[in-house]
Image: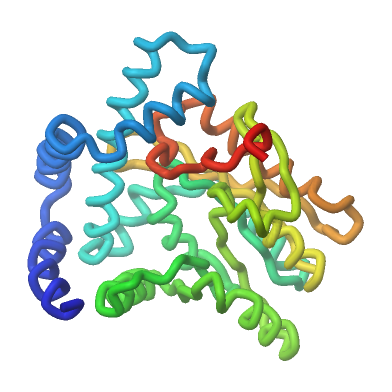
Amino acid sequence: MQLITFILAYPFIWLISILPFPMLYAFSDFVCFLVYRVFGYRKKVVRNNLAMTLPHLSEKERLQIEKKFYSHMCDMFLEMMKTMGMSQKQMEKRYRFTNLDLYLEMEKKGKSIILLCAHYASYEWLVSMNLHISFEGYGVYKKINNKYFDKLVKDIRSRFKTHLITTTETIATIERNHKVGKLGVFGLASDQSPQASRAFHWAPFMGIETPVHTGAEMLAKRFDMNMIFLKSKKIKRGHYEATFELMAENPKEIPNYEISEDFLRRVEKQILEAPEFYLWTHKRWKHRKSDQ
């Protein structure tokens, strides 16, 4: 059944990948109409998330954000497929780094790097970073149940020299590299909600006390890795800008959980600047301290 699903879907994905960008975004508008107006995909989740985290805004203002978010989400979903047919020149034109020199200076420190980012703007096109760096680039992701789609995603991202590793493979990969002195940069989007029963730390995120992913911080401390935050910004449709921000050069010297909380503050700042580009369909605030 997995293979049949893949065979049926692949021609559609391939067609999306070869569409000129104007046609891609025209099609995205149509998809958005279906997703938002017809099917109302996760509309209740989005609405609840916006109401909880942006209570200072009026209902009308939150509705405007909601509509813009669905448009952006559809763009991003199709851009992910478009990656399969993009050239290096197209990628570099549409996803630009403002201060790559900061990252390259960190490579000279001779330590592996953990790069933290949020599900914000275009986290999919971050794979283009590997065209500009010397370290081996790893993207930590959640494995797709359909093994054929999982392989396709890996193949697409490997075009831009990214090695995908699952969340369960992360520790073993870092440990193996550390033992042989192989330097790498590991990209993690750590803004989603962990299981409350496995959470080591709770902290306010967008004003709500929630469980926090602390794995990136603990890995950095354990293996003496530098930590960088990547701030993404959507300049206009199909064009993004990314800026590196140094978080910690000696994470062992920083009290536990301070780095994880610093990450949340940086993500909050992004969200408040332009909330429509955050991934509101995830149930990020499903676990709250007040519910415990």
Q: Residue 166, position in %: x, y?
A: 50, 73
| Quadrant of residue 101 within the rendered picture | bottom right
Res 9 seen here: yes
| Quadrant of residue 28 within the rendered picture | top left
Residue at the extreme bottom of the image, as rendered: 180
Q: Residue at x 12, y 34 (%)?
A: 38
In the image, 148: left or right of 184? left
Q: Residue at x 33, y 72 (%)?
A: 145
Q: Coloring scheme of the render?
A: rainbow
Q: Residue 54, position in %: x, y?
A: 51, 20
**Quadrant of the frame with the C terminus:** top right
In the image, 182: left or right of 24? right
Q: Is residue 243 above or below residue 218?
A: above
Residue nearer the viewer, 208 or 129: 208
| Quadrant of residue 16 within the rendered picture | bottom left
Q: Residue 51, position in %: x, y?
A: 46, 22
Residue nearer the viewer, 68 or 112: 68
